[in-house]
Structures are given as C-alpha cells and as structure tokens.
Image: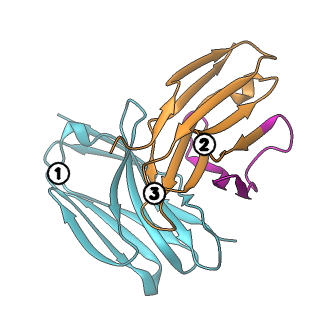
Amino acid sequence: GIQVEQSPPDLILQEGANSTLRCNFSDSVNNLQWFHQNPWGQLINLFYIPSGTKQNGRLSATTVATERYSLLYISSSQTTDSGVYFCAAVFSGGYNKLIFGAGTRLAVHP
Amino acid sequence: NAGVMQNPRHLVRRRGQEARLRCSPMKGHSHVYWYRQLPEEGLKFMVYLQKENIIDESGMPKERFSAEFPKEGPSILRIQQVVRGDSAAYFCASSPGTNGYTFGSGTRLTVV
C-alpha cells in the first residue's frame, strides 16, 4: 500500500553539526511537504517540495520524484532545531490527503 | 491572514462526556482535514471535508466520532462518550486544493 518511510528514526547532534534526513515514498506524489514539530507540539511547515530543490536559511530540501525520495538538510544545527521532523505526501491517483511518515526525532545538544 | 485557527488549545473531559473541537480554515481554503496524533507517534489521517460534504472518512473510528463542515462557521470534530484512549492531539489542516496544506496549533484532549 501507499506509505511514507523516514530515516533515521532518531538523531543526536552537537550544536554546529550538519545532518541529512531522508524520506522514501512508495508511489508517485502530487505533493510533498516537510514539517517541524517543536517541543511545544506546534507543527511548522518547512517546505512544499513535490520536486526539485529549495532552500530557506540553514535548511534545504531536495525531492527526486522519479526515484521516490526526498532529503532534508540541516546545516550548522542549533538547539532550537530540536524536535520531530515529519515528511508527508499526497499520492497521485485520487488520494487527496497528506500521508505522514513516522518522523525523525532530532535532539541538538549545546 | 490568521492561518488555521483551532480551539480550544487544551480540553479536559471526564470519561463519558462529549468533546467538540473546532477548526476555522485559512481564508480562501475550502478543504479541511483532521488528523490525530497519539503520544510519541506520527499524525494519522481521520477525515477530509469540503463545505457541507464529507469527502473521505476512511480514518475515522466507526463509532462515537463525527465531523462536519457547515456552509457557515468552523469545522467541528465531535467525539461522544470519550474514553481514555481518545486522549491525543487533534490537528486540523486546510488547503486550497491538493497543494500547500497548513496546519493549526492543535487541540490537546485529555480524558480523565
């Protein structure tokens, strides 16, 4: 069935380190988004990126739709980057709803 | 543009009571989605609505849960006769179509 898989499930970084989070999806997508859920539970939209590459400050994302994966890059990590990062996709074929991965839990230590 | 507004932010109910969660979509968005997040888990799709219509309720529990999005006013997620297992964060999202979903801050339901 349709599914979104994220790796790694957990990640611990020292402040200043870089990291790459991966999202694999099982079928063609019309929409792919990356979200950050902060420790207070708020869900922040980072990128809408069904294909291509986008950058926003220290964060960037790349989706290779033909190979069914997306990557989120975090550079020069800060403690405020801690939280859970979710990838979510709207699959082609009439599924007009976001399907979420299980998330990558990131802890950045000073 | 106020974004997606959910209220209340926190809701405490005793077992057997009813919980009503409200969601006002972003201006211009006619698609509303409800998701549930259990502690330490990801978000699970519950229901997708457009004005006055339920489009996809494949993620809704068969009993006690209902949702509506009337012609006027916010979308409502209703949980009747709540049980402890209903304790979770309930998120609402809206979109103008299939692109660019925006989420509200969620309602954290605690059943005691």
The cyan one among the chains is: A
User: Mark 3 to mark 1: distance in Å?
Assistant: 30 Å
Image-based side of B26 in relation to B64, left or right: left
Callout 3: chain: B
Compared with B4, A46 (above or below) is: below
Residue that extends furthest to the front in the rendered view of this protein: B72
Image-based side of A78 in relation to A30, left or right: left
Compared with B92, B11 (above or below) is: above
- Element marked by disc 2: loop
Q: Which residues are magenta?
A: B38-65
Same chain, labels 3 and 1? no
Q: Which mark, residue A31?
A: none
The orange one among the chains is: B
Residue A98 is a magenta residue = no
Whether tag 3 and tag 2 are in contact, CB under 8 A, the answer is: no
Kindly identify which residue carries mark 2. B72
User: Mark 3 to mark 2: distance in Å?
Assistant: 21 Å
Residue, x 75% and y 30% (percent of image)? B79
Compared with B43, A23 (above or below) is: below
Kindly identify which residue carries mark 3. B101
User: Mark 1 to mark 2: distance in Å?
Assistant: 49 Å
Label 2 neighbour load within 10 Å: few <14, some 14-19, many 20+: few
Kindly identify which residue carries mark 1. A17
Please provide percent x and percent y for residue A23.
44, 66
Please provide percent x and percent y for residue B17.
77, 17
Camera-side residue: A27 or B95? B95
Residue, x 75% and y 54% (percent of image)? B57
Tell me the kind of residue under disc 1: Ala
Residue B56 is a magenta residue = yes
